[in-house]
Image: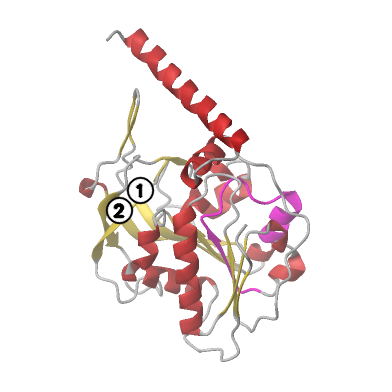
């Protein structure tokens, strides 16, 4: 087949897929996975203006946020929500889970030690909510960003992408694969007790650069690219996403605050992996500057999923 013909066929296939998605959306009959792809291509610009009713929470309190104006990781959000609730109960931490971006209000955020962006995507906050979150984090808050919190759907927010994540998402192989995670620090709360390496099944993000040499950054774990195929193959696309030095989990100082970033967490199975659950538990502990003390009056409150 001539190259020009192949290009035209790829365009026709892509156009047909786009028309099909729009038709399904109009009919209201989208399967959740198809709806996720639709939102990845055509993000929503929906912003919340009325904050959720936050119950009385004992200190320390954890805010889990999973609003998706972009691609929605349905399975991961559900499985991860269960994991975070289990972690909070076992440690005696209060927890509030919401998809309402108006929770990013300075008075409300002051009630929380840690904010987790659990696969939040698609620029979920308006300008005032972004500023409230920035003020809270730079003043000493603790942030944990999981998987989609690191993708390019947040590219419109320069501060977040540059000062919190520190790298630009390039893509990932279409298939989910097992790969070897190498632990680079074993004395961090998120990696204590882990083996020097473990095999993990997930979707592997690649970025435009390694953040290893950035000021205020510590690499906790990296992925061994020799243990999976880092190529993106789709239609005529065959892109090598190898980074060489490929951090997967790292921390960053943001003003007086702490940010913990993990590219892992696309599939629900990830949150049932004891090693990764241990990482998440330690991430919250580190970000919030929490010790192992149990708060007896902790409350687990979760807003209904939309």
**Residue nearest the observer in this picture, 185 or 177:** 177
Does residue 86 sit above or below 247 in this rendering? below
Determine if the magenta segment contains residue 242: no
**Residue nearest the observer in this picture, 287 or 123:** 123
Per the rendered image, the range of residues in magenta is 112-134
Q: Secondary structure at mark 1?
A: loop
Which is closer to the viewer, label 2 or label 1? 1
117 relative position to 223: left or right: right
Determine if the magenta segment contains residue 117: yes
Looking at the picture, how far across and down is residue 130, in whole percent? 69, 54
280 relative position to 93: left or right: left
N-terminal label among 2 and 1: 1
Give the crowd class for mark 2: few <14, some 14-19, many >=20 residues within 10 Å: many
* Tag 2 near tag 1, CB within 8 Å: yes
75 relative position to 1: left or right: right
Q: Secondary structure at mark 2?
A: strand
Q: Quadrant of residue 9?
A: top left
Does residue 255 sit above or below 72 in this rendering? below
Q: Residue at position x 47%, y 45% from top?
A: 33
Residue that carries the numbered disc 2 in the rendered image: 223
Q: Residue at position x 57%, y 58% from top?
A: 66
Q: Residue at position x 50%, y 66% from top?
A: 81
Q: Is residue 217 visible?
A: no
Give the crowd class for mark 1: few <14, some 14-19, many >=20 residues within 10 Å: many
Q: Quadrant of residue 13?
A: top left
Which residue of the protein is positioned furthest toward the bottom in this rendering? Answer: 296
Does residue 168 sit above or below 262 in this rendering? above
Residue that carries the numbered disc 1 in the rendered image: 204
């Amino acid at each position: 087949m001539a190259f020009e013909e192949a290009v035209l066929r790829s365009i026709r296939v892509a156009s047909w897929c786009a028309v099909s998605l729009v038709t399904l959306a109009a009919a209201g009959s989208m399967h959740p996975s198809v709806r996720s792809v639709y939102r990845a291509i055509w993000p929503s610009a929906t912003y919340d203006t009325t904050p959720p009713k936050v119950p009385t929470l004992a200190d320390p309190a954890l805010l889990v946020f999973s609003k998706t104006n972009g691609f929605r990781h349905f399975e991961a959000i559900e499985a991860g929500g269960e994991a975070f609730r289990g972690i909070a109960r076992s440690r005696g931490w209060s927890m509030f889970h919401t998809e309402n971006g108006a929770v990013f209000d300075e008075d409300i955020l002051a009630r929380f030690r840690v904010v987790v962006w659990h696969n939040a995507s698609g620029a979920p906050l308006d300008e005032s909510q972004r500023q409230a979150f920035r003020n809270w984090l730079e003043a000493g808050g603790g942030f944990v960003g999981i998987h989609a919190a690191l993708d390019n759907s947040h590219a419109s927010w320069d501060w977040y992408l540059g000062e919190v994540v520190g790298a630009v998402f390039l893509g990932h192989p279409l298939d989910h694969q097992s790969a070897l995670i190498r632990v680079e620090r074993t004395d961090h709360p998120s990696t204590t007790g882990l083996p020097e390496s473990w095999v993990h099944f997930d979707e592997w993000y690649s970025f435009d650069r390694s953040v290893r040499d950035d000021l205020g950054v510590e690499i906790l774990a990296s992925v061994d690219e020799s243990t999976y195929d880092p190529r993106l193959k789709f239609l005529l696309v065959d892109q090598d996403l190898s980074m060489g030095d490929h951090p997967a989990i790292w921390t960053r100082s943001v003003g007086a605050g702490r940010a913990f970033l993990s590219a892992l967490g696309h599939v629900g199975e990830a949150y049932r992996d004891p090693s990764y659950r241990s990482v998440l538990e330690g991430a919250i502990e580190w970000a919030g500057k929490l010790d192992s003390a149990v708060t007896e009056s902790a409350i687990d409150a979760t807003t209904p999923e939309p």
